[in-house]
Image: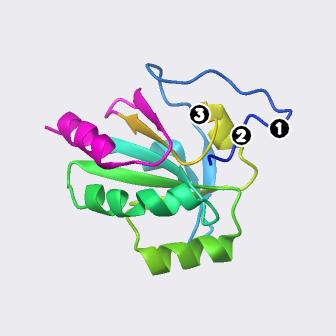
Amino acid sequence: MLKGLSNSNIYVPSTKVGKQLLSFKAKKLFSNEEIISDELFFENKIYLLNIWASWCVPCRTEHHNLMQLSSNPSVRIIGLNYKDDLINAKKFINQMGNPYSEIIIDKDGTISIDLGAYGIPETFIIDKNKKVLKKFIGPINAQSVKEIESLLK
């Protein structure tokens, strides 16, 4: 069900939970502008970094939960679009709604692998100091939403 990242011959690092988020560069989905991670994770908030793709069925399943979380002003959700056709990714967002503060592109999967992701969807909780607090493997569900909301209090 989850699309494996570790099926490639690329080295897959261990999970980054408890460690600082590594700096990276990416392009924005809708503007194609390059952005560095420091420009994404700059506010004094909790962040969710959600790895998704339009072709990912579990990503569709979790989307309504991300929409729910996006209404909370204490959290900022960054979407990392993984190995996707950009036209399909934009259609997905236009049809399903946009829970993301920003959407960046991971065309070749390098950013996801550097984060320690093994499949999609995966979601990382990142604190105001850019430390990775937790990783959810698979779709965000009602229980995940409760866990995330408890961190926001």
**Residue 88 in the image, given as x and y percentages of width and height:** 64, 75
**Residues in magenta, as a range:** 127-153
| Residue 142 among those drawn in magenta | yes
Q: Which residue sits at x=65%, y=42%? A: 111
Location of mark 2 (residue): 5
Whether residues under marks 1 and 2 lie with C-beta atoms below 8 angstroms apart, the answer is yes
What type is the residue that disc 1 sits on? Ser
**Residue 17 in the image, given as x and y percentages of width and height:** 47, 23
Which label number is shown at residue 8? 1
Q: Which residue sits at x=40%, y=29%? A: 134
Q: Earlier in the sequence, mark 1 or mark 3?
A: 1
What type is the residue that disc 2 sits on? Leu
Location of mark 3 (residue): 115
71 shown above or below 114: below
Secondary structure found at label 2 = loop
Secondary structure found at label 3 = helix
